[in-house]
Image (cartoon, grey):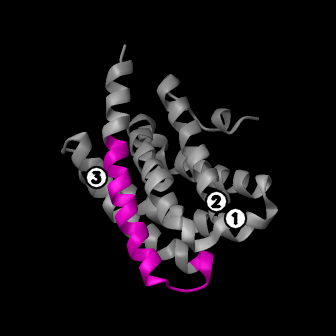
Amino acid sequence: ISPRLAISLTGERAGILIDITLAAIVAANLLTARYGPEISILNAFLFIGLDLTTRDYLHEIWQGKIKTNMVLLIFTGSALSYAFNVDAGPIAIASFVAFLSAGLVDTVAYQALSNQTYNVKVNVSNTLAAAVDSIIFPTLAFGGVLWNITAGQFAAKVIGGFIWAIVINAYIRSTKS
C-alpha cells in the first residue's frame, strides 16, 4: 500500500504535499546517515524547512485528523528511511522522535495562531518547531549536544521554512480551481 493512500487525503494538493514531505524526510535521513553532522545544516535548510512548511499546509487540510495523520506521516518517513538503508536506523529513530516532538509544538502553535494570516501561522509555528527539532535531533542522532550544529540547524530551518512558505503559498494560489 502506498504511504500516500495510507493517510486520509483531501484533494490532489494534499497528495503532492505528502509525497514532497516523505521525499524530504527520507532524503534528509539518508544523507545524514551517509555524511553525518556535516550535512545536517544543508539538510535543515533544503529539506526540514520544507517538511515543516508542508506539514502546516496539511494541517489546514486535515483539520480533525491532524494527530493521526501527522503521526502516520512522520512514522512513514522514518520507516521508509530505514527500508532504503538499514544503517540509517539510528538516524530514522532520532528523526522520528524529533519530528514528533516538533510536530506537537508546531500543531499547538499553529492552532493558537488560527486567527492570523497563513504566513504568520507558518513562520511562527515553524520557528518554535525548528527550535525543538534542532535540539532533539542532533542530540539523539550524534550522541550529544553539538551546539554549532544545533544553532546552524535552527537558523537553516527557520530561513528554509520561510522561503518554502513563499514557494508553497505561490504554488497553492496558482493551482486553485
Labels 3, 2: front one:
2
- Return the residue nearer the eye: 114 or 30: 30
Marker disc for residue 123? 3
Of badges 3 and 1, the one in the foreground is: 1
Q: Earlier in the sequence, mark 3 or mark 2?
A: 2
- Mark 3–mark 1 Cα distance, whole angstroms, equals 30 Å
- Residue furthest top in the image: 177
Please tell me which residue lies in front, 34 or 122.
34
Residue located beneath label 1 in the image: 34
Which residue carries the number 2 mark?
31
Q: Residue furthest left?
A: 116
Q: Are marks 3 and 1 in contact (CB under 8 Å)?
A: no
**Can you give x and y, in whole percent of width and height, for residue 75 in the image?**
64, 54
Q: Position of residue 104 (x, y in %)?
A: 44, 61
Q: Which residue is depicted at the point 39% across and 61% down?
A: 156
| Vertical comparison of 45 with 175: above or below | below
